Image (cartoon, helix red, strand yellow):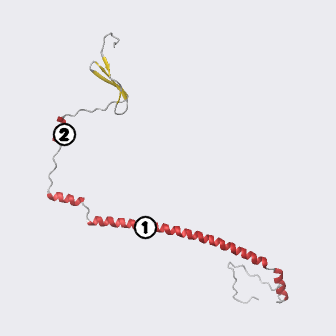
Amino acid sequence: MRNNQGNSRSTSYRSSRNDSAGYRSMTLSDNGRSYQYGSAVPKYRPERTTDDRVRRQLQRKPAPVVSERVRKNREKARSMNLGVVLLFSAVFALIGVAVFGELSLQASNARLRREIASMKSELNTVKLDNEEEYSRIMGSVDMQAIKDKAIGQLGMQYAQSGQVIVVADATDDYVHQYQDIQ
């Protein structure tokens, strides 16, 4: 390959490949220099030598010497004592009772709703039966026959104008008489 100055240069190409991130790249080597073309920058991975490993091992601190008393205190702190176990057990039991109570209340509520629905249905049936019976009774009563029997056989008469006394309307269904009306 020739450049603009006319000098000849040797250039070698390596074929395209996929790097670890999945990008295609091409490496170009020109007079001992290496260039990599592509859309991803390769990760820098320095090579570790045995000197690095030895240096890291030397930098590690040895485990501190712990007395027997300190070791026992640490083990005791890690273990759960009886009080903590009883406290957790009590909390879990309380939560279990609360959940069971809530579920039983929901079941009772559902049962009562079903009972209310069946009672409403029964009430509607009884109301319809009552209305039908009332209509049948009112249809069978002859008011003219009752009037004739009251006046003819029982001697009843219509009230005269001085016999009617108007009483103030009370909120109750009944009026109580505390003295004689004149």
Vertical relation: 156 (above or below) 121: below
Give the mark nearest the N terminus, 2 or 1. 2
Residue labelled with disc 2 = 56
Residue drawn at (69%, 72%) of the image: 128
Residue drawn at (37%, 30%) of the image: 23
Dividing the picture into quadrants, the one containing residue 95 is: bottom left
* Frontmost residue, 37 versus 166: 37
Locate the N terminus and report the quarter of the image it occupies: top left
* Residue 174 horizontal side relative to residue 93, left or right: right
Vertical relation: 48 (above or below) 148: above
Residue drawn at (52%, 67%) of the image: 110
Q: Position of residue 29 (x, y in %)?
A: 30, 21
Q: Position of residue 158 (x, y in %)?
A: 83, 85
User: Dot 2, crowdedness within 10 Å: few (<14), some or many (≥20)?
Assistant: few
Q: Position of residue 142 (x, y in %)?
A: 81, 80
* Residue 8 horizontal side relative to residue 69, left or right: right
Residue drawn at (36%, 65%) of the image: 92
At label 2, the amino acid type is Arg
Residue labelled with disc 1 = 100
The answer to whether any part of residue 157 appears in the image is no
Vertical relation: 31 (above or below) 102: above
Identify the secondary structure beneath mark 1: helix
Q: Which mark is residue 182?
A: none
Dividing the picture into quadrants, the one containing residue 126 is: bottom right
Dividing the picture into quadrants, the one containing residue 116 is: bottom right
Indicate which label's residue lies in the foreground, 2 or 1: 1
Vertical relation: 14 (above or below) 61: above
